Amino acid sequence: MPTVTRMFKRFLTLAAGVVLGAVLVEAWPRVAAAWSLWPDRGLSRASARVREVMKLVHENHVDGAAAGYDRLAREALHGMVESLDPHSEFLEKESRAGFEEDLSGEFGGVGIQVETRQDRIIVIAPVAGGPGERAGIQRGDEITSIDGRPAEAGGLDGVVGRLRGPPGTKVNVGLLRPATRASLAVSVTREIIRIESVRGIRVLGDGVGYVQLTEFTDHTGEQFRRALGGLLALGVRGLVLDLRNNPGGVLEAAVEVAEPFFRRGERVVSIRGRSARDQEELLASAEGPPVSLPVVVLVNAGSASAAEIVAGALKDTGRAVVVGERTFGKGSVQTVFPLDGGEGVRLTTAHYLTPAGERIHERGVTPHVEVVMTPDEDARLARQRARPDLADAAAFRARFGEEPAADRQLETALAMLEGLRWFAARAGGGTVP
């Protein structure tokens, strides 16, 4: 009998333990949440609220098609990310592909530059050696159709989107050639087209090299080094680096453009964010002595992001005189986090600091010499820089119905370089060459 009693007590103890364990398992999340020990307490609570609202909308909205779960989730993601700041965004599959294409500086296309003129799509110029030029497309041709559909459908952006596509695919382009009034149809096989972000390379009067950077892509550093090497081989005695209306782009490209003027190991830009992985010093890694030419950097309110990094780095370290207007002030780092299905999140994760520790974001880079252009002058100069084929004043006047604008910022840059050379010669006991 005692043995049975002991066994019965052991059974009760075991049963009580099982029941207590079940109670603890059931109660633990609430207890942990109350004690702030549940690591995702806020996330769980917020997710439950979003789920509740989505279910309510899905079941009760008058338009069932508009209230599908996929659509509601997509719109919720846009709103959640894009409410944070102007530069964070939820990237759907097409948007992410286009964004990465822009940063790479490469895309599948036919290699022509187009513009709208009196609601017509006109070829400014085909890319030299590109598939469009080889197929016979000429400057001044009007694009009338693409794959049998009128070119006007969708406007300029629609035309560009329809001309682009995977390399190796074909697109049929209908043309009207003004010189002969002949209608033509050409079939063009798309190829990888590389955007030339380094343009206008030339030697101005008195041996000054000029380079315009329109954006910063994966290939900008390589293109700039090639352009700079060519100008140095010609014996230029000063350099104008034109970053006006450059919206920025790839951070690494900005460092590559700046580092020929820095000694190896010098800081070009710092990154400061919340997490340890977002604390970084980007240093120049170029071999050999830095380029020691007098340099003037041209900036305006359209110079942003990577363009501001270059201007700020050269200004802070005394490598260049900055001329123009206060820059845009977009000094934040965006990181793209890939998601399943080709989607992604482009999120602001840090801010840039110049070598002197100055924050660029919402402040911009202040030029040494301020030369402010009117909006009208800016618009005309932007057209002039984009259309080197209309360098002649009469041709520009015939195309746009207005006189070319005087580039007062460039004129000031050239005057500054002349002054720098004069002071350098006087300091060295020589004469101005």
Image: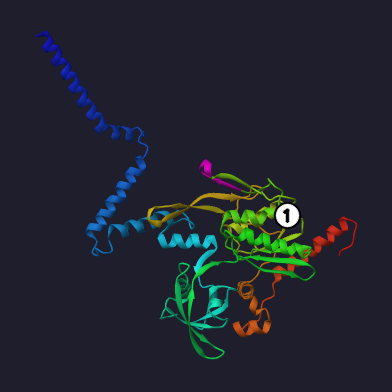
Above or below residue 10? Residue 328 is: below
Decide: few, some or many residues near mark 1? Use Cα within 10 Å; few <14, some 14-19, many ≥20.
many
Query: How far across and how far down the image is residue 423, in percent?
Result: 84, 59
What are the residue bounds of the magenta stretch? 270-277
Q: Name the residue carrying label 1.
A: 319
Q: In which quarter of the image is the C terminus?
A: bottom right
The answer to whether one can see residue 158 in this image is no
Above or below residue 270? Residue 166 is: below
**For residue 80, side relative to residue 48 (left or right):** right
Q: Which residue is drawn at 26% across and 31% down?
A: 25
Q: Residue at x 49, y 76 (%)?
A: 188
Magenta segment includes 31: no
Q: Which residue is drawn at 31% across and 58% down?
A: 70
How has the structure been colored for display? rainbow
Q: Nearer the viewer, residue 166 or 12?
A: 166
Magenta segment includes 271: yes
Query: How far across and how far down the image is residue 268, in percent?
Result: 65, 50
The answer to whether one can see residue 175 in this image is yes
User: Looking at the picture, which amino acid does disc 1 mark?
Assistant: Arg
* Numbered disc 1: secondary structure: loop
Query: How far across and how far down the image is residue 136, in percent?
Result: 54, 81
Q: Which residue lies furthest to the top in this view?
A: 2
**For residue 122, side relative to residue 94 (left or right):** right
